[in-house]
Image (cartoon, grey):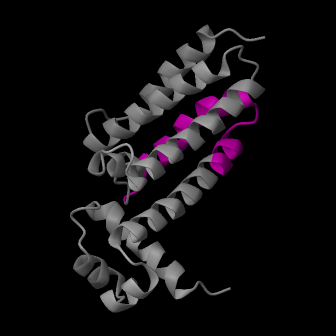
Amino acid sequence: MRPSKRDELVRKALVVFYNHGFHAAGMDLVAAETGISKTSIYKHFRTKEELILATLRLRDENFRNWLMRRTAALAGSPYEQLLAIFDAHGEWFALPEFCGCMFIKASAEFQDPCHPIHEQSAQHQRLLLDFQGKLARDAGFTDPDCVAHKIWILTQGAIVAAVMRVRENPAIEARSMAEIVLASAPRA
């Protein structure tokens, strides 16, 4: 099925915002890089913020679905999948189009915790924590939320290190730290 004009706009705008940032990408740039006129953009979205929210929803769905599928493909058991999260991140970091986490960027640009864009970004992170918490529960950890938070913190640090290029293999280093976390966490 062919995507609607609105879906096409969101998909193309996601790339613009991901590459340029939210404040730096004005609607003139969005129109120029998507090939969709500002008049058409505003037929679908009343404001730039509405368009940003739509791109964040799409990115959330795409990224989480990819991460869950990729993690399951890389490892069988929930315990091993907790580590495979870092292998998947390493693959993501190696992509030529990698520009970091769109949600970290959004929360940095829209810092008011009550702003809808900040809230959408935080929701993405909570959903990742839920996924990691489920893996930790299925792996038999007695405090799966604690394990999930530690894994999440390591992934976020690896993402920042990958963007800043301060370490050559941040996903591998974070995975090594995650191995220590998992080995020391009590299991039922």
Q: Position of residue 131 (x, y in %)?
A: 65, 38
For the point 42% across and 78% down, the residue is: 45
Q: Position of residue 154 (x, y in %)?
A: 45, 28
* Relative to 154, residue 126 above or below: below
Q: Position of residue 118 (x, y in %)?
A: 39, 49
* Residue 22 included in the magenta stretch of the image: no
Residue 26 shows in this picture: yes
- Position of residue 46 in the picture relative to residue 110 (left or right): right
* Relative to 68, residue 18 above or below: below
Q: Position of residue 21 (x, y in %)?
A: 28, 60
Residue 37 shows in this picture: no
- Position of residue 63 in the picture relative to residue 166 (left or right): right
For the point 55% across and 15% down, the residue is: 181
> How many numbered marks, from 0 up?
0
* Residue 71 included in the magenta stretch of the image: yes
The magenta-colored residue range is: 68-96
Could you say which is closer to the camera, residue 74 or residue 85? 85
Majority secondary structure in the magenta region:
helix
Could you say which is closer to the camera, residue 129 or residue 68? 129
Could you say which is closer to the camera, residue 77 or residue 101? 101
For the point 77% across and 27% down, the residue is: 138
Please identify the quadrant where the C terminus is shown. top right
Please identify the quadrant where the N terminus is shown. bottom right
Name the image quarter holding residue 147: top right
Residue most toward the front? 114
Name the image quarter holding residue 40: bottom left
Could you say which is closer to the camera, residue 13 or residue 168? 13
